[in-house]
Image: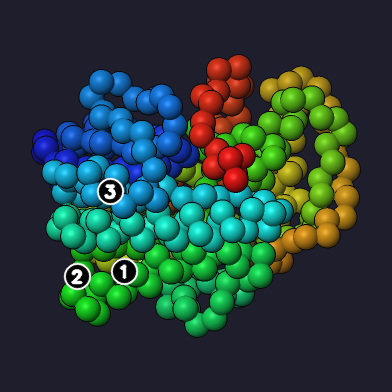
Amino acid sequence: MKTHFYGKKVLVTGGTGLIGIPLVKKLVDSGALVRVVSLDSKSPFGKDTEFVKGDLCDKNFCAKVLKGIQTVFHLAGIKGGVRVTQSKASTFLVKNILMNTQIMEAARKSGVEQFLYVSSICIYPPAKIFFEENAGKGLPHFSDKFGGIAKLVGEMQIEAYRLQYGLRNFLIVRPVNTYGPYDNFDPVSALVIPALIYRIFDGENPLIIKGNADVVRDFVYSEDVADFLILMASKNVPGPYNVGSGVPVSIKSLVNKIVFYAENFLGKKVNVKWAYAAKAGEKYRVASIKKAKVELGWLPKVSLDEGILRTMEWYQANKKRLPRRYNILSEE
């Protein structure tokens, strides 16, 4: 049975990352002809996937890599926790804006059929629940200022294309905190779930948690996001759509879940100690996924418990041979 992507030439930027790897595999299985762009040195894919190493901040490279492409999934971006976004503020702001600007403008000029931009819920002004229609009604929270504004500028670029050129083929999706296999497990720059898994499996005991236990977040499994991107592109709807679980999870509850499963893996007790953190993001941040449910019939399939368990199993099996990935934060 032929799918929407059968025989189509598809470009996935950031295709060697957390969402990119499951997305590319699904696209290949659907019969797409996939080209992956990354700054990594090696491809994690087979010969059925074209791999191109290059910098999306380079205007000429963007034009070159888009030749013959019909659909673009733009996943490439720089992410990190609150401390990293402050210490590497220029990198988060300038590099994200530059790569978004260059690849989108090259795509517009090349006349691609579809361009799906993976934005972020970091673009929203402070609120307990994020609804799509509230984007742009204020600046992002100060802890997300640089990364959030960079993503928001990308969305504004798409809005400008619609106003000036009447383009409706640039689509927008806003994932929440995404986790899963192939994540960044570097404890310096990793987000909360992979960082905790790394530290526990590395033997940190007691496990020192620098943060507030009652902070609430929304988490979504990477494969669920990949499924949504394919669904959204297949239906060719511009969005924007939030992609998350819609379920509030306190950091205390998250830590307890990770520790519980880690203790079963390791066969030993993991002691937890909480320490005060000077820097913190918003206290409560959850995305409404009602729009995706009502308009596209989408709901995430993988629960947080199952997702943590899958991620931990993958990490346990692969931690000794994790791929060495390019990390722009270590270069800046």
Image location of residue 276, percent across then percent down: 87, 55
For the residue marked with disc 3, what is the amino acid? Asn
- Residue at numbered disc 2: 167
Q: Which residue corresponds to the image point at 18% horizontal and 75% vertical from the top-left?
A: 166
Above or below, comparing residue 251 to residue 53 in the picture: below
How far apart are the alpha carbons under marks 3 and 1? 20 Å
How far apart are the alpha carbons under marks 3 and 2? 23 Å
Above or below, comparing residue 152 to residue 180 in the picture: below
- In the image, taking residue 174 as reference, residue 48 lies left or right, namely left
- The label nearer to you, 3 versus 2, is 3
Image location of residue 325, percent across then percent down: 51, 31
- Residue at numbered disc 3: 60
How far apart are the alpha carbons under marks 1 and 2? 8 Å
For the residue marked with disc 2, what is the amino acid? Leu
SS of the residue at dot 1?
helix
- 3 or 1: tag closer to the N-terminus: 3
For the residue marked with disc 1, what is the amino acid? Ile
Contact between marks 1 and 2 (CB within 8 A): the answer is: yes
Splitting the image into 4 quarters, where does residue 138 fall?
bottom right
Question: Residue 158 shows which numbered tag?
Answer: 1
